[in-house]
Image (tube, coloured by chain):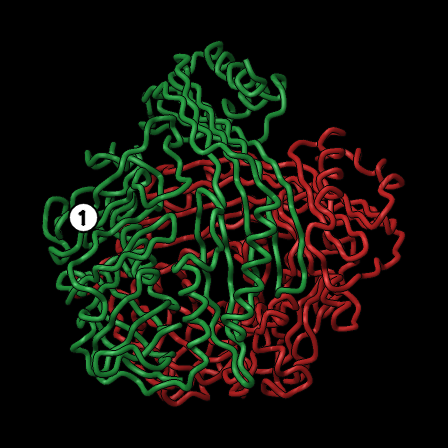
């Protein structure tokens, strides 16, 4: 038995002695190798490992939950005692979670970090980006390799584990002109292998190209209330929307507009949205939940009908609506049938929104935001930068009758969404 | 409290190295409509090392507080040297002192639960309009011991407490509207628990704000004269001024880099990032040393409207030929330090709030901001979750959530009155690749802003 499993066993044994109703222990260890560059001037290389044990214990409707490092069995017993004390001091509720750990042991893509290849790809990215996009300056750029291992053990002795490894690129940048710097942009992408230059990835090169184009002279404010959300913007909006409408507090209290809409039409029938950690579009996502069960893809909206919510076990207990089947943020929306150029072909004067400042919807779905990294659509073509346009209106109403969804999906390694066009939101102000 | 074992490595560090033992502990409790929704306790503890040699910089970290972790961290930092060439070298400033920051006690679980229960029952009794009551309480403590080859030995440990409150009620048209507030303590967390007077006063104010918001109207879009209250003004200072003056972002092209030495704000405006005191008073989050072993000093950003400086780590200070300000901090033991704000604030002016309101014919008073974003261009946007009309110098109806936006330097140039009292906001975490505890403060300011609908 490994040291880690001995520690988990020591914790579970302690809870058996105490007479716990249920307990589950998760040990998550990661080893990260990172090449970091700041402002293309300061570079630091990092090797970090960490191991965290998360303990959840139940007794008489009380729950205790703590997480901490755990180096040996003595420390494991102390942590068990600490979790027990937290549980004893907690408010009694109906907390219970008697779901056995699934017994699966998974291993994916377990290669170690290839530092030489990381250096090659990082240096190549900096060099090629400077040639192809000379105005773009990275504020920060990190290339990481992550090895992750998660182990689970429950009170009945059921165990599970998963091991995986992947590469991640994370960058923030803006284009710097003679008299003006653009808004910053970010790019986050995951890769199973670093088998090709990073700028060969359209998602990354597209983001850098867009940033540089923002230095072009800006156009006027759009004349029509027609908005095309980029995949990145749509991802952010759908993430914020589902979190405000479909999570515990909003659903239990009945204060969100979608809280009583399960099984009913909530969006245009062209919209189908899932949280799909097992999708082939997704890299490096956990396949076990935080309680040691297998994750499942979850359909949120299918052809406009609300099919499920994002509730916790407590939310399920309060509402009798099934809890979420993963803790993932891997959002996938079905592509439409129309290519982007046809989606925008009849727009005389609208806006392609590359990023929103703000945009978090209220419980009623109202949003208020400023368009950033955005371009005018003029006579069916994406033309000039157009920033500072205020976008307001009701996002739920806008989604209820969308004008169209693109055939193109943007895949960043952990999401896959298309462009979405709507004429139900109001535009005002801009362009700066 | 962590022991002093890493001090013995002081004489063994050799080259330019900083060794840090770092422990974070947090407790987060969410209490919703009379019952506990979540109650999470977490800690992380470990050792990290930051080593420089010539033009190379390496960082390594390992969990645990033992000799093995020290040796692993030091080895990893050294192994990482030289993988990428850095363009310049940085001298380590020679200090030889022991710096010990203040130490606070923590609070028992029962005290926390009682406070949350009391808050919920108080609102339930006094404000039936609040149909959805949410409270979240956070205790966060950070303890560091640090030794460096420049001779520094340092220890800091502080605890901060905050309770976030969100109340929701139904508006006249059937929509739901919410108000938010926060109680926060850094200096004396026990004050939060020994008497509930401050809590009840905060809840009374929020309940009143909710009742007004149930009758609220939509704001009129356009450019308006506004009183930006302490909370939104502090957020603007942090997001739209502070970040643009962090030297790594300046080098990455932020707008502040173009304006050093120029008038960027009204002469009434002075902004600093304060290390451990402001105007002779201790700031909420005192920093005495940073994670590169630099003794912390104030970084003045704007003085009487002129942009005078930035926040620096050792590298950027060398680049600009100035003394490092001690702004380089990592959030956990596993985080290499970055240039981060500490206590960033506008210094108080001379105007009373009521005189500022009286000076507005047609505008708004914004009391509290929800989420907000800013850009390295200085452009900012905040969601205003509590605001009121001002008509003919008097406060009017409450308004629905709206956005206000602008460019920081233009907004600060429009300031013609600055309030006489600074309030600090130090709840939440600043995000810049890694989280960080920071504080932002401001008096109310009278300025011009773009308002959404």
Which chain did the image draw in green? A
Can you tell which quarter of the image residue B368 is in?
Answer: bottom left
Kindly identify which chain the residue marked by label 1 belongs to.
Answer: A
Question: In the picture shown, does residue A43 fall above or below B146?
Answer: below
Residue drawn where x is 18% and y is 75% of the image: A345
Q: Residue furthest top?
A: A17
Quadrant containing the C terminus of chain A in the rendered view: bottom left
Task: State the residue position of label 1.
Answer: A301
**Residue B106: quarter of image:** top right
User: In the rendering, at what x and y percent does residue B146 appear?
Assistant: 77, 45
**Up-down relation of residue B160 to residue A95 (above or below):** below
Extreme front residue here? A196
Compared across the picture, whether A216 is left or right of A229 comes to right
Comparing B67 with A87, the one in front is B67
Observer-nearest residue: A298 or A284? A284
Residue appearing at x 59%, y 18% in the figure: A3
Q: Please state which of residues A114 and A218 is positioned toward the viewer in this rendering.
A: A114
Marker count (numbered): 1
Q: Position of residue B87 (x, y in %)?
A: 73, 64
Circle 1 crowding by C-alpha within 10 Å: few under 14, some 14–19, many from 20: many
B141 sits left or right of A152 in the view: right
Residue B184 can be seen, yes or no: yes
Q: Residue at x 75, y 34 (%)?
A: B70
Instruction: State the residue at coordinates (38%, 26%).
Output: A292
Q: Please indicate, yes or no, whether residue B183 appears anywhere in the rendered image.
A: no
Q: Position of residue B239 (x, y in %)?
A: 52, 68
Q: Which chain is red?
A: B
């Amino acid at each position: 038995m490994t040291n880690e499993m001995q520690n988990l066993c020591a914790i579970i044994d302690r809870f058996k002695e105490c007479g716990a109703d249920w307990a589950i222990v998760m040990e998550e260890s990661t080893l990260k190798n990172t090449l970091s560059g700041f402002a293309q001037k300061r570079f630091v290389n990092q090797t970090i490992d960490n191991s965290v044990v998360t303990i959840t214990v139940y007794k008489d409707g009380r729950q205790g939950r703590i997480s901490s490092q755990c180096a040996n069995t003595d420390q494991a017993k102390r942590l068990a005692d600490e979790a027990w004390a937290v549980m004893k001091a907690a408010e009694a509720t109906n907390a219970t979670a008697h779901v056995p750990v699934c017994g699966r042991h998974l291993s994916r893509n377990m290669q170690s970090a290839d530092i030489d290849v990381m250096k090659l790809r990082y240096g190549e990215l900096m060099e090629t980006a400077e040639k192809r996009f000379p105005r773009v300056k990275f504020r920060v750029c990190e290339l990481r390799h992550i090895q992750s291992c998660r182990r689970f053990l429950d009170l009945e002795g059921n165990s599970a584990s998963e091991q995986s490894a992947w590469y991640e690129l994370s960058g923030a940048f803006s284009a710097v002109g003679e008299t003006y710097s653009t808004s910053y942009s970010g790019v986050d992408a995951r890769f199973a292998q670093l088998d090709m230059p990073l700028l060969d990835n359209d998602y990354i090169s597209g983001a850098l190209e867009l940033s540089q184009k923002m230095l072009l002279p800006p156009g006027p404010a759009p004349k029509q209330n027609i908005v095309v959300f980029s995949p990145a913007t749509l991802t952010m909006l759908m993430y914020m929307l589902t979190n405000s409408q479909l999570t515990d507090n909003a659903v239990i209290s009945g204060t969100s507009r979608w809280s009583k809409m399960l099984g009913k039409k909530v969006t245009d029938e062209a919209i189908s949205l899932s949280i799909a950690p097992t999708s082939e579009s997704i890299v490096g996502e956990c396949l076990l939940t935080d309680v040691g069960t297998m994750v499942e893809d979850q359909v949120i909206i299918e052809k406009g009908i609300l099919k499920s919510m994002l509730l916790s076990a407590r939310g399920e207990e309060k509402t009798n609506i099934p809890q979420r089947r993963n803790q993932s943020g891997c959002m996938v929306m079905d592509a439409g049938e129309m290519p982007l150029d046809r989606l925008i072909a009849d727009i005389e004067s609208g806006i392609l929104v590359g990023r929103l400042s703000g945009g978090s919807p209220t419980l009623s779905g109202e949003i208020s935001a400023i368009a950033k990294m955005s371009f005018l659509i003029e006579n069916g073509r994406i033309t000039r930068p157009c920033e500072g346009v205020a976008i307001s209106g009701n996002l739920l109403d806008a989604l209820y009758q969308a004008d169209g969804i693109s055939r193109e999906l943007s895949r960043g390694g952990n999401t896959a969404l298309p462009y979405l066009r709507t004429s139900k939101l109001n535009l005002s102000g801009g362009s700066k | 409290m962590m022991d002093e074992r890493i001090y013995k490595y002081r004489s063994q560090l050799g080259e330019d190295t900083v060794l840090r033992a770092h422990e974070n502990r947090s407790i987060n409790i969410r209490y919703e409509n009379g019952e506990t929704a979540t109650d999470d306790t977490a800690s992380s503890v470990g050792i990290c090392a930051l080593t420089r040699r010539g033009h190379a910089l390496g960082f390594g970290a390992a969990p645990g507080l033992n000799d093995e972790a020290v040796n692993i961290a030091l080895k990893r930092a050294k192994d990482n040297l030289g993988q990428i060439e850095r363009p310049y070298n940085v001298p380590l400033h020679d200090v030889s002192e022991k710096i010990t920051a203040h130490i606070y006690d923590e609070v028992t679980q029962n005290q926390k639960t009682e406070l949350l229960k009391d808050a919920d029952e108080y609102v339930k009794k006094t404000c039936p309009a609040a149909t959805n009551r949410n409270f979240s309480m956070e205790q966060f403590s950070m303890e560091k011991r640090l030794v460096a080859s420049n001779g520094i030995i340092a220890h800091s440990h502080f605890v901060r407490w905050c309770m976030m409150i969100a109340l929701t009620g139904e508006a006249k048209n059937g929509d739901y509207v919410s108000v938010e507030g926060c109680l926060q303590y850094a200096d004396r967390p026990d004050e939060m628990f020994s008497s509930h007077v401050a809590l009840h006063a905060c809840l009374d104010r929020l309940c009143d704000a909710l009742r007004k918001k149930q009758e609220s109207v939509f704001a009129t879009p356009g450019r308006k004269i506004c009183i930006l209250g302490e909370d939104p003004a502090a957020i603007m200072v942090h997001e739209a001024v502070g970040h643009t003056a962090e030297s790594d972002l300046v080098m990455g092209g932020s707008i502040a880099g173009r304006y050093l030495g120029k008038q960027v704000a009204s002469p009434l405006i002075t902004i600093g990032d304060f290390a451990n005191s402001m105007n002779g008073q201790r700031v909420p989050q005192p920093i005495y040393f940073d994670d590169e072993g630099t003794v912390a000093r104030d970084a003045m950003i704007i003085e009487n409207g002129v942009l005078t400086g930035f926040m620096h780590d050792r590298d950027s200070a060398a680049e600009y030929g100035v003394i490092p300000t001690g702004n380089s901090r990592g959030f956990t033991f596993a985080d290499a330090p970055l240039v981060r704000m500490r206590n960033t604030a506008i210094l108080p002016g001379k105007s009373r709030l009521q005189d500022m309101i009286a000076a507005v014919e047609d505008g708004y008073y914004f009391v509290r901001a929800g989420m907000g974003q800013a850009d390295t261009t200085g452009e900012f946007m905040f969601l205003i979750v509590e605001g009121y009309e001002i008509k003919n110098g008097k406060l009017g109806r409450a308004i629905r959530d709206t956005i206000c936006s602008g460019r920081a330097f233009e907004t600060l140039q429009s300031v013609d009155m600055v309030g006489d009292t600074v309030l600090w906001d130090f709840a939440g975490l600043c995000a810049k690749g890694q989280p960080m505890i920071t504080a932002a403060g401001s008096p109310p300011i009278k300025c011009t802003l773009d308002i959404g609908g």
